[in-house]
Image (cartoon, coloured by chain):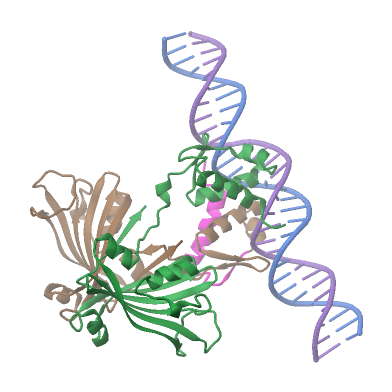
Chain colours: A green, B brown, C purple, D blue
Amino acid sequence: MSTPRFVVIKQHLLKQIEQGHWPEHAPVPSENELAEQFAVSRMTARRAVSELVEQGVLVRQQGKGTYVADHRAQTPMLAIRNIADEIRSRGNRWHAKVLALTGTVASNGDAVGFAIEPGTPLFRSQIVHLEDDRPVQLEQRLVNPALAEDYLAQDFTQITPHEYLCSVAPLTAADHIVEAIAANAEQAQQLQIALHSPCLKISRQTRSRSGVVSIASLIYPGSRYRLGAHLDF
Amino acid sequence: MSTPRFVVIKQHLLKQIEQGHWPEHAPVPSENELAEQFAVSRMTARRAVSELVEQGVLVRQQGKGTYVADHRAQTPMLAIRNIADEIRSRGNRWHAKVLALTGTVASNGDAVGFAIEPGTPLFRSQIVHLEDDRPVQLEQRLVNPALAEDYLAQDFTQITPHEYLCSVAPLTAADHIVEAIAANAEQAQQLQIALHSPCLKISRQTRSRSGVVSIASLIYPGSRYRLGAHLDF
DNA sequence: ACCAGCAGCTTGTATATACAACCTAGCTAT
DNA sequence: ATAGCTAGGTTGTATATACAAGCTGCTGGT
């Protein structure tokens, strides 16, 4: 068989919610009703409901029933936002200066995680993002050529690399490493800050369904940037 | 009623892993073996395993078996972790040096957000956390006296402030600001690093149901600490 | 020597059933 | 009238069973 039956039931339930037929807190059919409706056993219907409860889409109350969950409970935990959006949301002008946009061959030691032939040139970009003409982010990026063929042809003064990559390869996950570093000579010059100034460095690996899309290193002058994070327990 | 049987099995599996009896990638007993061992049906054993797979503790391969997952795959979405746990999980010794543990009155400019009478002294602590005798975190904290009355009586060489606060006031949310700073004279001396070394500074406000519990400033030497974060889309 | 295929293990899906725990509406006895 | 009980719904746990799907090693035939 193709898709398991409990998946069909999950899709049906999600559809009702997404299309607005079942608003927040609306009661969902009981496990027995779903079982009858889809001609499956209660255990199968229950599994569909259980997985949606696990995902936070539904909530169950023993003895009462199952209900559509609050939508706000689904917000992502950490908002590492798009730099251009962030600048614009502060009402300032964003623009980008492209320092390099080339192909490059990964050195032997690079563990980039792209599933490509050894020796295939990677796409590489180096960009400074400016807020009202003041540098706020130095972005160095390696891109998987198999997943973003037209990367080098983009005009990154109009669209950010991150925005472009999202449009061609929908993200499924991202890992970040945040650390404090002292700016080296090149970084200091490009960000127009003093040598050895403290900077926030975010190393980000983004993945889509088909594999690792890109690896980016984002460097922010410590004096000009703060990263906000919110957690709910 | 006692604890459900599948929970007992989960606890047993977790214990084996935590105590190091089952290293990464080690095979876990099959569902049938677990069922026999605990005298339950296979479906019950399977449920225990399934929930640990869902949590990322185990991985399953159809036709082969179930294995202990990579430990790195278990990291929570945003790992701003308890420093003592983190040090211990690296197999190193944690200990703390208490620099100050007093009451203090908030200056007019302090926007601490505690819902208390003006002029009430706040609890304040200043602690250095050491990993194998090397300082890795400087923690400065203001605590709401209304929500943690016995705070000043704790022995913070045995329990971290964060652990203690969690035990008296369960957290409901936390906000963080992450930034890069240059160490000032006092910070440099307490962390035994050079003046103006880059440091990661995490400012954290934690809240429980009854209000803001504490405000902490955590400073890590940039050369000794990285913060990991993972996002799923 | 080699390889095809099968036997026997694993996990994955699905069913029918039973009883426990919990909630609520409505009825009954005081 | 109201307090309390009960009947019948809900979800929660657990069992025994069956077959499908995927991996691996052994065995038998060429």
Q: Which residues are magenta?
A: B1-29
Quadrant of residue A1 in the image? bottom right
Please determine whether, in this image, residue B117 is positioned above or below residue A222.
above
The residue nearer to you, when weighing A157 against A86, is: A157
Q: Is residue A87 left or right of residue A101?
A: left
From this viewpoint, is residue A177 visible?
Answer: yes
Percent coordinates x, y for residue D11 in the rendering: 54, 40
The residue nearer to you, when weighing B220 against A29, is: A29
Quadrant of residue A95 in the image? bottom left
Residue A184 located within the stretch drawn in magenta: no
The residue nearer to you, when weighing B214 against B127, is: B214
Percent coordinates x, y for residue A44 in the rendering: 64, 47
Q: Residue at x 16, y 57 (%)?
A: B124
Q: Residue at x 46, y 81 (%)?
A: A112
Q: Is residue D11 left or right of residue B186?
A: right
Percent coordinates x, y for residue A69 in the rendering: 46, 44
Please determine whether, in this image, residue A188 is positioned above or below residue A226.
below
How many numbered callouts? 0
Q: Residue at x 27, y 79 (%)?
A: B223
Please determine whether, in this image, residue B46 is positioned above or below residue A110.
above
The residue nearer to you, when weighing D30 against B37, is: D30
Quadrant of residue A183 in the image? bottom left
Please determine whether, in this image, residue D17 is positioned above or below residue B87.
above
From this viewpoint, is residue B158 visible?
Answer: no
Q: Is residue A175 left or right of residue B24?
A: left
Residue B16 located within the stretch drawn in magenta: yes
